[in-house]
Amino acid sequence: MLHAAAKITVVGKGPLGPVAECLQHVCRTLPTTASIPDTIACPPLCFVAPEVLREWLTAETSARLYEQIQAALAPLGARPLRLQVCRADEDADLGECLPPAVFLAQQGAPAERAQQFLASLRTLIPNTATPQTLVLSALAGHQQARRFFPLGSGVAYAANPYAWSEYIAPEAGVARLALGLETALQDTSGETFTRTVALAAVQRRPEADFDDIAQHSQRFATVLNLATARVEPCEVTDLLKELSARQRELLLSSGPSVLAPVGGDVAALTFDRLLTRTDFVGDLQRLLAALSALFHAPAEIAFTFNVETTGAYQFQLHHARPMADWPLVGNLREQVLVGGVLNPARQVAGRPLPTVARTTTIKTEVLLEAEGAVLGRSRRQPLDHLIYIPAEQYARLPLNARFEIARLLGRLNRSLPAGRWALLGPGRWCTSSPELGLPTTFAEINRAVALIEVVEMHSGLTPDVSRGIHIFNELIGTDMLYLAIFPGNPHNALARERLAAAPNQLAAVLPEAARWADVVRLIEARAFGGAAAIELHADSRRQRAIAYVADGRGE
């Protein structure tokens, strides 16, 4: 089916970088792709080349500069804008970690908008020596008095890294949805909840009951304040009041909850009827399938969507590329974790899809291996610290002491820098039953990059693996990796003696906790000597993970 061609402009010359060029190619290709439904479109787009962007960020303001910006913005109209920066240097690749998108209100006459745009650009976008491309896309949405917002934002992946149940096919894809701007999807505090939906099992949820659903539903959305030209939070209930009855019907579900008045029900933002009574999910699946065929690799996208008062909906595609991935290949103990799933013989926009090809030879021992319960984005992550709770020592503790250990872990969580350390312990993390694991709250561990359960406690008890279901929304919100180690199973291993022999830095960080040093081991990567580093590789698609000490790097 022939769709309306995307309105695309390019300001300046030179390479735009793989991420921007991939999106440009997608938006030129989709209008002629027969399998793409009418509900999906690319918004008006403007690509600002690195040399022009550098001039906008550094040049003295002048009438000529404002005229240049005004001309660039003209094809986008007067609608609010989404701004995304991506690298354009020769080392850039399709798997780069993109900074969060930012949003501009665009108010006033064209000349005023150009001045506002430049002032905001210089505040929001860092000027670096690395060549960058600016991708501008026009936002469609709803306006309520001074507030503007797309009804919803989403990200979707053709391969599901969050397959929380054996009944969910990872290859069928997953989406995350939020009311309003995509800022809620980028929040990693663990306190902002969004809707995660397995595209082939829409009604299969990780929550146990509607009370759990209500407590983990989105309560705050972000909108553009057109009066102040700022992004601001807004209660979901306030936004929903202004929608039509049909729109609310598609977005809300109701049921019993402790949050409801006695004898009553509570409404929660679930998107359930939009997902089950329209072809919303089918359209997403068709789009992901078409892009995956184009990339010869699973696709990832970012989009906004709007629902009319009649219930009709429309997607706008703002970002598309092959999924970033770090698959594990071959014999992990001998050689070699090769990054990138992209076939270099394939091309997007006339250039080869780059691989992220790095080879690491394991020159010292493996610290842990896991297979069968890996939840979260595939990644290659260096670790500065590992917090290890040995099962044998923990199992000897009385129940009240286990709560003390949980509070101690909370203090460690606040003391260590976020995102460079992992937790490794017996049984379930964040359990309400200390006999089954560690009774931390999620707030006491939310700065870790990975959470690893060892499926053991003592000779008389082996807890069932949790698969992170009881903290699923928090794991996704913080982008935390979950692993489970099944001792004795193939491709599952834990180097207990090596971890027990490593120096314990607990007393150095928390002197008052020294008496718990036999139960809580804070291990630094440098404790393994020289230039050693702990490397964690996880491949959710193949359900494999490994952490090891590497004292040297491959090519």
Image (spheres, helix red, strand yellow):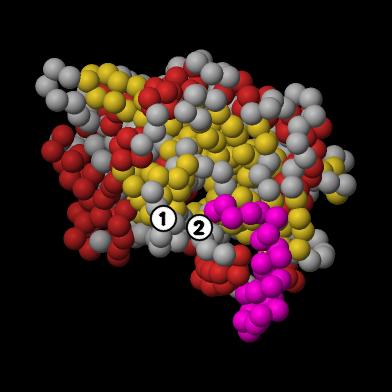
**Of the residues shown, which amino acid type is indicated by label 2?**
Ala
Which stretch did the figure color magenta? Answer: 54-80
Query: Would residue 334 be found to the left or right of residue 431 on screen?
Result: right
C-beta proximity under 8 Å, tags 1 and 2 = yes
Q: Give the quadrant of residue 157.
A: top right
- Examine the rendering and report whether any part of residue 224 can be seen: yes
Percent from the top left, x then y, of residue 445? 33, 46
**Of the residues shown, which amino acid type is indicated by label 1?**
Asn
SS type, badge 2: loop
SS type, badge 1: strand
Q: Residues within 10 Å of mark 2 (few under 14, many from 20)?
A: many
For image coordinates 85% across by 39% down, the residue present is 346
- Examine the rendering and report whether any part of residue 393 can be seen: no
Residue to which mark 2 is pinned: 105
Percent from the top left, x then y, of residue 66? 65, 74
Percent from the top left, x then y, of residue 8? 75, 50
